[in-house]
Image (cartoon, helix red, strand yellow):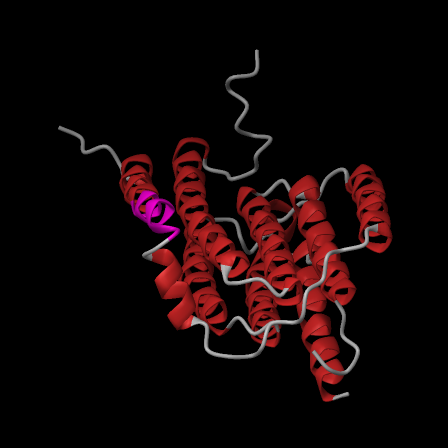
């Protein structure tokens, strides 16, 4: 019963703020609503016994991506002007497309007999994840650092001003 | 998990979040708004990974995939926002319909 209440509260927070992101007329409201969506997802992760992933989500999404997005919103002018900053177009066709896609996915979710083992026991996951990263997943782990380095250099190269002679 | 929360609950939640993200991507003209929609879509994919990891009774593979998705989302956000700022410097707007120099 308690798990149910917590799940529905977190789901309501996530879906409500995600809807605000999708439908808000002001880009600043959308950005701050994204904070609520990310926090709701953090709660869902904890509910799914993924403590380490939840903390990674908190650090990377809320501490990194969201702050970066707020910076980008504030750095681009015209945010105060609602019609300029967050104009939505083609709302009707987009709604129809999303509705059809959602119905197809709902049908797939309901009709598929998912393989279900026993539910994972709620226990600290850092030990197992650390061992997996330096064992089976060591190559993807190292390639990931290369990707991040390339992204770092690429972002600097793309966004900096050319120094005039 | 007790209390009658099943795998389907999480799948439907992730479906709703995905739909909202897809709608954001399709209907926004603001480039930063489109990036926010992509973040929502990636979050819904991660909810799926963790739900399957939890109810599949496997090991940590689903959680590790979720961490890789978060890592790639961070890289995507950094590059995407850098591109948006570069567009803003050139066009003085981040309306994606305005950046159409390449169309004939």
Farthest residue in the left direction? A165
Farthest residue in the bottom direction? A2
Compared across the picture, whether B12 is left or right of B104 comes to right
Residue at 86% of width from left, 49% of height from top?
Answer: A107
Q: Tell me where residue A149 sits by quadrant.
A: top left
Q: Tell me where residue B16 sits by quadrant.
A: bottom right
Front residue of B95/B60: it is B60
Residue at 55% of width from left, 67% of height from top?
Answer: A35
Farthest residue in the top direction? B104
Front residue of A54/A65: it is A54
The answer to whether residue A142 is magenta is yes
Residue B96 against residue B63 in the figure, above or below: above
Is residue A2 visible in the rendered image? The answer is yes
The quarter of the picture where the N terminus of chain A appears is bottom right
Magenta region: which residues? A136-145
Residue at 73% of width from left, 57% of height from top?
Answer: A115
Position in image of residue B11 (x %, y %): 73, 59
């Amino acid at each position: 019963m308690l798990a149910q209440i917590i799940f529905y509260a977190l789901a309501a927070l996530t879906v409500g703020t995600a809807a605000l992101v999708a439908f808000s007329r002001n880009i600043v409201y959308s950005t701050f609503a994204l904070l609520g969506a990310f926090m709701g997802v953090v709660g869902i992760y904890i509910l799914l016994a993924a403590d380490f992933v939840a903390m990674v989500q908190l650090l990377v999404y809320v501490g990194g991506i969201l702050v970066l997005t707020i910076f980008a919103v504030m750095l681009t002018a015209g945010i105060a002007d609602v019609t300029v900053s967050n104009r939505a177009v083609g709302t009707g066709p987009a709604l129809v497309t999303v509705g059809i896609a959602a119905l197809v996915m709902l049908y797939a979710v309901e009709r598929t007999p998912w393989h279900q083992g026993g539910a994972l026991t709620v226990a600290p996951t850092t030990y197992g994840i650390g061992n997996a990263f330096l064992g089976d997943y060591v190559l993807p782990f190292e390639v990931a650092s290369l990707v991040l380095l390339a992204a770092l250099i690429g972002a600097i190269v793309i966004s900096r001003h050319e120094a005039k002679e | 998990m007790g209390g009658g929360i099943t795998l389907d609950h999480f799948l439907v939640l992730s479906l709703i979040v995905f739909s909202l993200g897809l709608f954001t991507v399709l209907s926004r003209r603001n480039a930063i708004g489109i990036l926010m929609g992509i973040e929502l879509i990636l979050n819904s994919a991660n909810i799926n990974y963790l739900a399957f990891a939890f109810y599949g009774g496997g090991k940590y593979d689903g959680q590790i995939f979720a961490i890789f998705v978060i890592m790639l989302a961070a890289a995507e956000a950094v590059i995407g926002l850098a591109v948006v700022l570069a567009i803003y410097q050139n066009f003085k707007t981040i309306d994606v319909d305005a950046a159409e120099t390449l169309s004939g």
